[in-house]
């Protein structure tokens, strides 16, 4: 006799309860009654032969088995829904979906113009913007979470190749009312002691720590390590800290007047944005086509 297995309904249930912690809220998310969801919980526990939840003050607390399954459900269902979306798009005349992510930054102010121009010439290729771990873009490429990564770091991997996109520089960013906002150039000695918000306090070879602070042995006052650039910009705009970010990525916020961007000195800290993809992508395939189109577009638009 075959062992009874969980099906997708049970996985959706475990994920929903893991997110909400309450039968009522999880049932609402799934479009079920609380009674129907309770029956589904019992059915899943019967099939597994193990308890999944414990009730505490009208809430459900996951057992170790449920927590293990919840971590799997989040990834599995995300991949399943992504595949479903790709099938729907292909059925609508889309032959291939190319998934793109930008390292560290949520910098997509360029995307609508590029996408419109690209799709006019390549109607059978769709482009999807991906979230996820934006610090390890090579890892995201190799596990096939993304197909193209727009990166600024200098990492090289035997399984990937890159096309140069454009040159950029790191800039000091602060609120318009900050005392340093009127400077033409910012040096390490100017930032020393300033409240500073950074992506990470772990030094990286091509970022501000190695290129600005360490050579002068002058350091800011670390306020916070914030991995979301949107949150860094909000803190800077509220004059609750300063930072060093890529000029291209913060350009829209500078143009709107929310923050100021000042070059670093005495020598600029240059970075090069590149488009990284897997080496096993066909030379004339959709991913390569998008990468080459990005290189041409940024060359034309800066």
Image (spheres, rainbow, N blue to C red):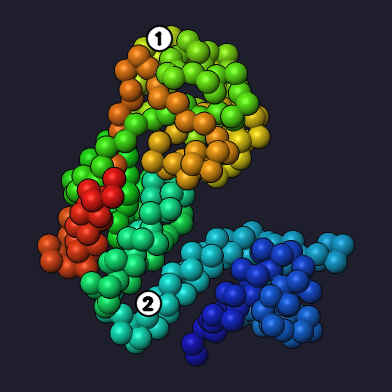
Tell which circle, 2 or 1, labels the residue nearer the N-terminal end.
2
Which disc, if any, is residue 216?
1
Q: Residue tagged by mark 2?
A: 86
Nearest the viewer among 46 and 230 is 230
Q: Quadrant of the C terminus?
A: top left
Residue 151: % across, % down: 32, 44
* Quarter location, residue 37: bottom right
Residue situated furthest bottom in the rendering? 1
Q: Position of residue 290 (x, y in %)?
A: 24, 62
User: SS at mark 1?
Assistant: helix
Residue in the image at 42% along x and 18% along y: 185
Mark 1 burial class by Cα count in 10 Å: few <14, some 14-19, many 20+ = few
Instruction: Give the CA distance from mark 2 to mark 1.
Output: 51 Å
281 or 15: nearer the viewer: 281
Looking at the picture, tell me which residue is in the foreground, 98 or 170.
170
Q: Give me the residue at 58% from left, 39% from top.
A: 258
> Could you say where residue 9 lies in the image, as x and y percent from the top left?
59, 81
In the shown orientation, is residue 15 left or right of residue 166?
right
Measuring from the top left, give residue 167's x and y in whole percent: 27, 37
Q: How many neighbours does mark 2 have within 10 angstroms: few (below 14), some (14-19), or many (20 or more)?
A: some
């Amino acid at each position: 006799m075959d062992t009874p297995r969980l099906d997708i309904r049970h996985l959706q249930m475990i994920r929903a309860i893991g997110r909400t912690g309450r039968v009522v809220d999880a049932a609402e998310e799934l479009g079920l009654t609380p009674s129907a969801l309770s029956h589904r919980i019992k059915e899943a526990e019967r099939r597994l032969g193990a308890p999944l939840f414990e009730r505490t003050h009208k809430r459900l607390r996951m057992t170790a088995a449920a927590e293990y399954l919840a971590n799997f459900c989040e990834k599995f269902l995300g991949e399943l829904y992504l595949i479903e979306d790709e099938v729907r798009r292909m059925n609508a005349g889309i032959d291939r979906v190319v998934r793109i992510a930008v390292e560290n930054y949520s910098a997509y102010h360029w995307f609508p113009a590029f996408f419109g121009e690209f799709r006019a010439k390549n109607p059978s290729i769709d482009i999807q913007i991906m979230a996820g771990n934006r610090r390890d873009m090579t890892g995201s490429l190799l596990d096939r979470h993304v197909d193209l990564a727009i990166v600024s770091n200098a990492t090289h991997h035997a399984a990937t190749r890159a096309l140069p996109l454009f040159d950029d520089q790191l800039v000091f960013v602060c609120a318009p009312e900050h005392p340093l906002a009127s400077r033409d150039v910012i040096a390490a000695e100017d930032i020393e002691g300033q409240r500073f918000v950074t992506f990470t306090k772990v030094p990286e070879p091509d970022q501000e720590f190695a290129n600005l602070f360490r050579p002068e042995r002058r350091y800011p006052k670390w306020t916070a390590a914030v991995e979301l650039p949107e949150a860094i910009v909000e803190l800077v705009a509220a004059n609750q800290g300063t930072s060093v970010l890529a000029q291209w990525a913060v350009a829209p916020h500078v143009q709107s007047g929310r923050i100021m961007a000042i070059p670093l000195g005495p020598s600029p800290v240059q970075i090069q944005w590149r488009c990284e993809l897997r080496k096993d992508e066909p030379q004339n395939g959709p991913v390569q086509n998008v990468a080459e189109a990005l290189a041409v577009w940024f060359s034309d638009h800066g």
